[in-house]
Image (cartoon, helix red, strand yellow):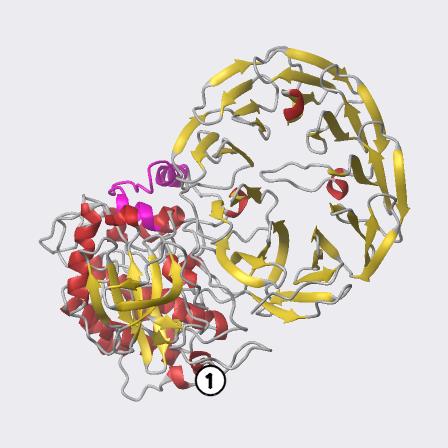
Amino acid sequence: MTGPLLPGDPERLGSVRLLGRLGAGGMGTVYLGRTPGGLTVAVKTVHEHLAAEPHFRERFRREAAAARAVTGAHTAAVLDADPESARPWLATAYLPGVTLRHAVAATGPLEPPAVRSLGAALAEALTDIHGAGLVHRDLKPSNVLITADGPRVIDFGIARAIGDHGLTGAGDVIGTPGFIAPEQITGAIVTGAPRTRGAVTGAADVFALGAVLVFAATGRSPFGSATGAVLLYRAVHEDPDLTGVPEEVRELAAACLEKDPGRRPTVAEVLDTAADPGAPLWWRAEPLRSLVLGETAAPGAPAAPDPTDPTDPTDPTDPTAATVRGPAPQPRTHPLPSTPLPSPPPPTSAKSVAARRELTRRGFLLAGGGGFASLLTYALMRGGGEDDGKGREETADPLAVRRGSVRQGAVRWTLAPADSGATVDALRLAGSSLLVHGVGTLDMSDIGGGRGYVTARGLPDAGRRWVTGAAETAPTQWGVSGSVLAAADLGLDAVDLATGEPHGTQERLGVPLWFSVADGVLISGYDEDTRLPSLQAVDLVTGEERWTEDVPGTRPAAVLGRTVLLADEDGSYIRCADAVSGRIRWRYEGFEGPVAALAAVPEAGCFALLSTGGTLHFVHARDGGRLATATLEGGASAGSSALAAVGSTVLLATGGRVHAYAPATGAPLWSVRTVGLDTSWPAVTGGGRTPVTAGGALLHWARAGQLQCVGLRSGEERWTARLDGVAQVPPVAVAGTVYAATGELCRALDLNGGAAQRSWGAADIRDLAADRSGWYARLGAATVRAYNHTAVTAPSS
């Protein structure tokens, strides 16, 4: 739906009255507006930091003027613009419809005749665009809008006048990995054409057209799913994957995807090949017709409203598009980040390893190619990667909501994948939002997410706040740091919790083994065989690299304020560094044996380090002086041990027991039996685990079905609840209530005495979270459900 205007948003731009927000991305904000004559328009504005750059403003000025000359039947008209405004803006026609990406996601790949017809329409649109002296440069599925009158090519915000190189340096590129032409990446010279290096012609749009046809026919990019850097590499060095492309389309697509722009067909030749006067009007056939016209809303959804009504559920990514698909109006979706994908498969040669590392380490530089400059940095690193913000903002909701009751003890709502075959594999509570990760059914490489996604659902009603692409592997490290979601293992270094918009991030090759956040700095540790240097620190907000270090095999860092303790696996490198500058404050000597675990103890002003030999060191954070040591009989395993501080007590879980120590003296305080680390200690941001504590007590599973409450000071048992079934997830404590799941039941217990308050039937609980109103569970691999402990006040409409 259209979001409300926020404080600081303009009420008018020129003569256009703004009605609400459609979206926001790497380039700026998109508003829904209405002209004095009553015409509904989409108004794109430029971020202030871009508008302040003469380089960018001049580009905007020239492109806006050129785009107004594009008036073809298969394009969206640019109606007005003001490049000289303090906040430059451009208004386009607001057309009801869905993007090609959305259409394929909802109804599946197109039939061969429809793909050929689409190719003809795109060629016609490019004829008009090129005739106005423009090269689109970013043709992709989310820039193709399917309307009741047929396909339209949209978004001329980053098109550039043919042959105009005066505004950028050599090698500057605009485009989307997976659809971008090789010459846009490397600055290759067009065969037989008297052009300078870096010139991009309409042949680049033909390459993108071929990639779009492959997507329309198969639901995926011709270069697969990977990080932006790897997709760029494949576009230059590897053949497109045409598996599954029908014979009727394959030859045309292959010709368009030639590496050499001089060998590709012209737009006129594509049109001549694809045109068929007798072709069916495929966008008017079911089920696509109903999708476009809004006649197939999700179960329980109301009829689609007037698309000119600002309360209409819109396609917020495409400023020219209004989508009328989906459930009841939900908060708008935000742009997907550029490279939130899993690490690529192992390269087959040392040459490809070196080439891909060069891509990562030098801002996507390719061997023999030019570097990316300011606009590509914005597009790829700050919301414009594989199919940048425009297509991502309109991403179809991956989850459908089934409403329940707000009564005490009732099921409040159920979330399930909107498409059969999709999964839900993780959830995490973050303030007033519930974060859900899952894998959909559509290859979303054109919008930067493979098939993975993260969505934030507002509480208490599960309304969608945003959706962003992510790696497909279930997260083990994700968590919240201040106002951002940090999920480096999902390819999301920092996502604003309120909006879903990515903060500045560094491009990475592979997934870190661990990460920590200290004073606004993200510190990541990598396998030295995957990435060098193996330690990297970047600003969590800007993405600026702060410092790096080559330390093989580091353990997850311990953070105390602005200081961070770093240790390698064998214990030969133990350093305390300033998180912001990387300056080494002190080195710790005398540690024997491999490191099993480390932790910060804020109340004692020290760090704790555990060796696999069973020696626990307490080290002063100020100067590295040793405070005390303790010895654990039997040693400790690095893979199944965890250290954590709770107030002035240090807890160590290892070998089926929890031990408590006083850091000032190293004295053991108490020890109790526990069933296992994974079952009793939930995962924390960046890797590692932490105990469940509340009211001065430790809550853990002493045995398979026995939840025990132990006083932190004395270790004395306060109570034990003997429950039927086996525990699979850690307990959760909030507001004096403990939620414990065993077998096919979840119970609410009184924190003070362990008395049962309520129980619910819920089979196969795999994740558990709770707040004051009740609890939330991931049930199996396809359901998230909310249960009320108390009556819930329904949100005001």
Kindly report the secondary structure that dominates the magenta region of the rendered protein.
Answer: helix
Residue at the (65%, 63%) spot, across then down: 782
Instruction: Report the span colored magenta.
Output: 350-379
Taking the image as shown, residue 617 lies to the left or right of residue 297, namely right
Q: Which residue is mark 1?
A: 286
Q: Is residue 161 visible?
A: no
Residue type for callout 1: Glu
Residue at the (24%, 79%) spot, across then down: 73
Q: Residue furthest left?
A: 194
Compared to 451, does 723 lie above or below? above
Residue at the (43%, 85%) spot, across then down: 285
Residue 266: image quadrant is: bottom left
Compared to 310, does 492 lie above or below? above
Residue 267: image quadrant is: bottom left
> Picture coordinates of residue 140 (x, y %)?
34, 63
Compared to 368, does 145 lie above or below? below
Give the crowd class for mark 1: few <14, some 14-19, many >=20 residues within 10 Å: few
Compared to 567, does 761 lie above or below? below
Residue at the (69%, 22%) spot, across then down: 610
Q: Quadrant of the C terminus?
A: bottom right
Number of numbered discs visible in the structure rendering: 1
| Front residue of 742 and 531 | 742
